[in-house]
């Protein structure tokens, strides 16, 4: 018997299977696209991370070069100050897709018309707030006597040296980072010095001044919001964009440019030998070709039990002693302006391994020099003018200040204990970058080359402040420069 075929189920749509297949294909396509996007994102992130590390390495090559130049520059030379051939657009290496460069830069000197220098800034060109000596802080522009008193109270009178240790300054969080990267309102409005914070002790960074009543971001750092040493459009537009500025087409770099918290030197001669203590000369004088009058004078000092506080005191000096007959006689030092440079180089009165807070006569600007005892702005400007024509040999000693008649003997003796012509601690910024990718890292560095050692004592990543300036002419496209963002951290 022949069976009839079974009827199709009622209500089953004829295109159901086709629809199911289409949905499955769409879902699989979405999964595939998602996987491809994820893979591409990982590749992009990996490439960005690699680029960031390469930019960091290029910047660190700039730090190494700065250490080399600072440690090998002869006494009296200022080769570290501005050397575009050494510090600008230096090729480090090529990786097949990018050329990696570094550029070292610092803010230009106040007397210069340039915006930036391709070199280093010596800390000895500034007033050391931890060891100000006899400096009158009130002579710094915008520093009132009340503010100066507040700073002195905040720092205190500790004589314990701050240790010089390598440190990686955080780029996020912590007082050092916050004080540099974030705008801070005036914390001291309406606060008197009597209500100021108790003694803080030696400062670790200039940014800690923002904790002093009366100090604000604009007072300390001026209009240079990205710390690139250049007057950018947002720094010359009034109050339209941060930071607030006076729209005078001149970059106000604030009071931070006049201050440091670390500057010191080792008591060594220009040849790197240990200096002789004038108060304990002993057998150390043997073999030295010294004027007989000077050796007699040193012996007379021992007899009279006179202690010197600085070698400059022997300039045109006399000491009274009693002779064999009991009569008082004057013994001259025999040191005139001709012998002064050698005496200053060979001798010391210090027993400590470092002298802190000395101001470099050859690099400090007029405002810093005007903080010295007995120096007004007019005399300070005369010092700056006189040094401009000196040879490196003449600049290697502070003796030129007296030899060239800028000050008399009495003024020189008063100033000499505060002065030096050498610098061992430096600060600068360096940017490492790749062409044509445009990836970059910007670092702020502090180095110390005292005692023949080369140390990085501070390092800070300030990439988040943005690209400081056009890095390498037209080789880096304008579109890349304008739209570039900091690499992933």
Image: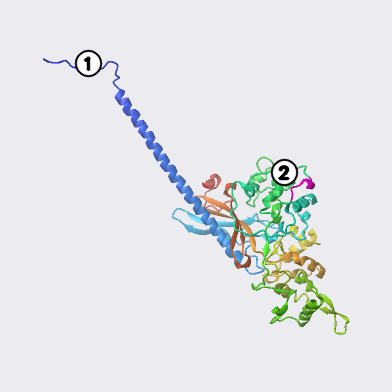
User: Residue 423 falls in which quadrant of the image?
Assistant: bottom right
- On the image, numbered disc 2 is attached to which residue? 187
Q: Which residues are magenta?
A: 192-198
Q: Tag 1, which secondary structure?
A: loop
Instruction: In this rendered view, identify the residue nearer to me: 412 or 95.
Output: 412
Residue 486 to residue 91: above or below: above
Viewer-side label of 1, 2: 2
Label total for image: 2
Q: Is residue 364 above or below residue 275?
A: above
Above or below residue 485? Residue 346 is below
* Marks 1/2: CA–CA distance: 90 Å
At 76% from the left edge and 55% from the top edge, which residue is drawn? 137
Q: Secondary structure at mark 2?
A: loop
**Is 329 in front, or is 460?**
329
Badge 2, how many Cα within 10 Å: few under 14, some, many 20+? some
Q: Which residue is mark 1?
A: 7
Q: Position of residue 302 (x, y in %)?
A: 78, 77
Q: Are marks 1 and 2 in contact (CB under 8 Å)?
A: no
Q: Is residue 314 left or right of residue 264?
A: right
Residue 268: horizontal and vertical position, in percent? 67, 71
Residue 22 lies left or right of residue 382; in this view the side is: left
Residue at 68%, 54% in the rendered image: 203
């Amino acid at each position: 018997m022949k069976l009839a075929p079974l009827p199709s189920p009622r209500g089953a749509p004829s295109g159901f299977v086709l629809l199911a297949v289409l949905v499955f294909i769409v879902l699989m396509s979405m999964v595939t696209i998602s996987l491809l996007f994820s893979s591409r994102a990982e590749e992009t992130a990996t490439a960005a991370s690699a680029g960031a590390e390469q930019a960091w390495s290029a910047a660190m090559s700039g730090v190494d070069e700065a250490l080399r130049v600072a440690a090998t520059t002869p006494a009296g030379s200022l080769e570290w100050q501005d050397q575009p051939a050494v510090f600008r657009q230096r090729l480090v290496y090529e990786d097949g897709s990018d050329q990696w460069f570094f550029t070292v830069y610092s803010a230009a000197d106040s007397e210069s018309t340039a915006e930036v220098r391709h070199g280093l800034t010596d800390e000895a060109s500034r007033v050391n707030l931890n060891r100000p000596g006899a400096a009158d802080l009130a002579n710094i522009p915008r520093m009132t006597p009340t503010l100066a008193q507040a700073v002195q109270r905040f720092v205190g009178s500790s004589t314990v040296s701050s240790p010089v240790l390598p440190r990686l300054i955080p780029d996020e969080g912590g007082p050092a980072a916050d004080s540099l990267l974030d705008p801070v309102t005036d914390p001291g409005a309406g606060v008197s010095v009597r209500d100021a914070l108790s003694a803080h002790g030696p400062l670790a960074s200039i940014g800690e001044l923002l904790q002093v009543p009366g100090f604000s971001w604009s007072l300390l750092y001026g209009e240079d919001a990205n710390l690139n040493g250049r007057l950018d459009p947002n720094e010359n537009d009034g109050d339209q964009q941060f930071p607030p500025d006076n729209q005078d087409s001149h970059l106000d770099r604030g009071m931070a440019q006049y201050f440091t918290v670390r500057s010191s030197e080792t008591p060594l001669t220009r040849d790197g030998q240990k200096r002789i203590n004038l108060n304990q000369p002993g057998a150390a004088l043997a073999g030295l070709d010294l004027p007989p009058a000077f050796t007699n004078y040193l012996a007379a000092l021992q007899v009279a039990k006179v202690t010197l506080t600085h070698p400059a005191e022997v300039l045109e000096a006399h000491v009274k002693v009693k002779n064999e007959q009991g009569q008082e006689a004057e013994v001259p030092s025999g040191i005139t302006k001709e012998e002064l440079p050698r005496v200053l180089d060979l001798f010391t009165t210090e027993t400590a391994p470092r002298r802190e807070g000395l101001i470099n006569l050859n690099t400090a600007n007029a405002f810093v020099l005007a903080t010295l005892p007995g120096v007004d702005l007019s005399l300070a400007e005369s010092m700056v003018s006189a040094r401009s024509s000196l040879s490196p040999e003449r600049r290697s000693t502070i003796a030129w200040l007296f030899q060239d008649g800028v000050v008399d003997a009495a003024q020189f003796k008063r100033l000499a204990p505060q002065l030096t012509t050498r610098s061992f601690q430096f600060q600068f910024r360096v940017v490492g970058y790749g062409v044509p990718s445009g990836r970059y890292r910007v670092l702020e560095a502090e180095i110390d080359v005292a005692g023949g050692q080369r140390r990085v004592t501070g390092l800070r990543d300030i990439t988040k402040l943005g690209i400081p300036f056009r890095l390498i002419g037209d080789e880096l496209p304008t579109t890349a420069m304008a739209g570039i963002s900091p690499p992933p951290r």
